[in-house]
Image (cartoon, rainbow, N blue to C red):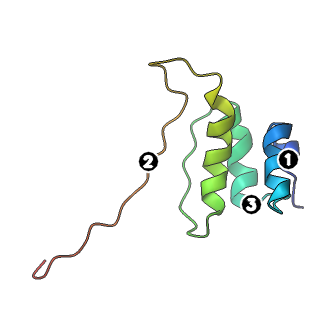
């Protein structure tokens, strides 16, 4: 069963912005991560490569930003990068 972002705890103003872009239901990675992140739990997930994981982590972080205080971050996103391959490497 696919759930709405609002049912996962995402603020209604964020849900409205998503709906304006045609996004109304969550993918499985989002269903699994959003409630835990909003509850303050640590979450790790494998990258799907489709952009679904960007919303899975980004939406809760955006929602929590107004609760943060200077010098006291509410979240950290670690994003791997691809290093260019050099000839002979």
- Residue nearest the observer in this picture, 36 or 74: 74
Residue drawn at x 48%, y 20% is: 72
Is 86 positioned to the left or the right of 66 in the image? left
Q: Earlier in the sequence, mark 2 or mark 3?
A: 3
The percent position of residue 80, horizontal first and vertical second, equals: 39, 57
Quadrant position of residue 14: top right
Quadrant location of the C terminus in the rendered image: bottom left
The percent position of residue 27, horizontal first and vertical second, equals: 76, 62
Residue occupied by mark 1: 16
Is 42 positioned to the left or the right of 29 in the image? left
Quick one: label 1, few (<14), some, or many (20+) residues within 10 Å? some
The percent position of residue 39, horizontal first and vertical second, equals: 70, 31
Q: Nearer the viewer, mark 1 or mark 2?
A: 1
- Residue nearest the observer in this picture, 21 or 42: 21
Label 2 to label 3: alpha-carbon separation = 21 Å
Label 3 to label 1: alpha-carbon separation = 20 Å
Residue drawn at x 66%, y 53% is: 55
Callouts 1 and 2 close, C-beta under 8 Å:
no
Quick one: label 2, few (<14), some, or many (20+) residues within 10 Å? few
Q: Which mark is residue 78?
A: 2
Q: Nearer the viewer, mark 3 or mark 1?
A: 1
């Amino acid at each position: 069963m696919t759930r709405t972002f609002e049912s996962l705890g995402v603020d209604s103003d964020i849900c409205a912005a998503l709906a304006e872009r045609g996004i109304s239901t969550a993918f499985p990675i989002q269903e699994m991560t959003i409630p835990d992140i909003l509850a303050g739990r640590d979450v790790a997930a494998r990258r799907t490569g489709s952009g679904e994981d960007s919303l899975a982590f980004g939406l809760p972080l955006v929602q929590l930003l107004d609760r943060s205080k200077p010098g006291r971050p509410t979240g950290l996103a670690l994003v791997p990068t691809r290093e260019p391959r050099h000839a002979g490497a």
